Each structure stands twice: as C-alpha cells, then as structure tokens.
C-alpha cells in the first residue's frame, strides 16, 4: 500500500495555509513508511531510514540547524552524516511549543 497524499498545515503570518502534497512525486524511488504531523510541522520516514521534515521550525523541531520555516520536505542530514538509521518518528506541538522525536535501529531516542 502506497500513501500518495498528505495534508500539510503550516502557520504563516497568523493564517492557516493547507495544501495537499503528493508523496509519490517527492519520493519516486523511496517508499514512505511512516508519517507524523503536528499543528506546525510534519515528518516523513522512508524505507532507507531517512527522516524528512517541513513546516514551522521556530523551536528547531525540523532538525535542520535553523529556526527558519521550510516549505518543502528536506532530509535531516544530522542522521545521514552519522549513519544512523531511524525506525520510528513522532511530531508533536501545542499552541506554544513543538518537538520531534526519532528512534534509531539500535533503540536510541533522539
């Protein structure tokens, strides 16, 4: 079963912007195995163990080393550079703060 659509919500200038994203077009060679979304950001996990993130990053929850918003899914390179394979992801937020979590193949929580 291949999931082809994801509903992404982002907060921009106090307005909620929603759009449909085609997962198949973004990842034509990788299989998306897990999706986790919050009020402010989204995470995707692929069959290669890579995490991609997009959305608001005001708390650094995207994992790109920046507090800048990211409108397109981008791989979290920190895990790639350390050759850490991820097996599970979680994105969460409330009205004030956001966070992301990942579990490695070895059982480490990040």
Image (spheres, helix red, strand yellow):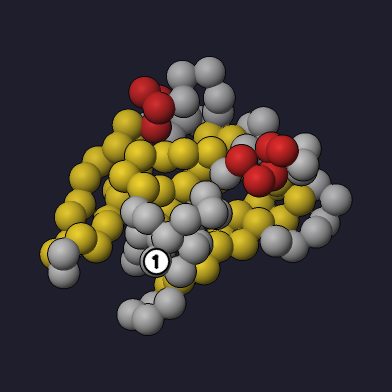
Residue drawn at the location 47% of the way across and 55% of the way down: 66
**Relative to residue 88, is residue 85 depicted above or below?**
above
Please state if 49 lies on the left or on the right of 33 as rendered. Answer: right
Measured as percent of width and height from the top left, residue 90 is found at 56, 60
Which element carries disc 1, helix, strand or loop? loop
Q: Position of residue 42 (x, y in %)?
A: 42, 53
Taking depth in this image into account, of 17 and 68 the one nearest to the observer is: 68
> From this viewpoint, which residue is outermost toward the right?
106
Q: Residue visible at 43% across and 77% down?
A: 97
Q: Is residue 52 above or below residue 17?
A: above
Q: In the image shown, does 23 or 74 lie closer to the viewer?
A: 74
Q: Is residue 28 above or below residue 65?
A: above
Residue at image point 47% right, 47% down: 53
Q: Give whichever of 23, 12 is nearer the camera.
A: 12
Count numbered badges in the picture: 1
Q: Is residue 45 visible?
A: no
Residue 26 in sight here:
yes
Query: Which picture quadrant has residue 76?
Result: top right
Residue wearing tag 1: 58
Q: Position of residue 33 (x, y in %)?
A: 57, 39
Which quadrant of the figure contains the C terminus? bottom right
Give the residue furthest to the bottom.
96
The answer to whether 10 is drawn above or below residue 74 in the figure is below
Residue ID at (77%, 37%)? 83
Packing grade of label 1 (10 A; few <14, some 14-19, many >=20) is: some
Q: How far across and how far down the image is residue 40, in percent?
A: 35, 63
**Is 24 positioned to the left or the right of 7 in the image?**
right
Q: Quadrant of residue 68?
A: bottom left
Q: Nearer the viewer, residue 58 or 85?
A: 58
């Amino acid at each position: 079963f291949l999931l082809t659509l994801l509903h992404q919500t982002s907060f921009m200038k106090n307005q909620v912007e929603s759009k449909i994203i085609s997962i198949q077009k973004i990842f034509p060679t990788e299989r998306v195995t897990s999706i986790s979304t919050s009020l402010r950001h989204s995470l995707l996990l692929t069959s290669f163990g890579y995490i991609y993130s997009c959305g608001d990053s005001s708390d650094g929850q995207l994992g790109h080393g920046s507090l800048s918003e990211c409108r397109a899914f981008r791989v979290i390179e920190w895990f790639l550079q350390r050759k850490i394979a991820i097996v599970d992801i979680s994105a969460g937020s409330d009205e004030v703060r956001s966070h992301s979590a990942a579990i490695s193949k070895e059982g480490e929580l990040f």
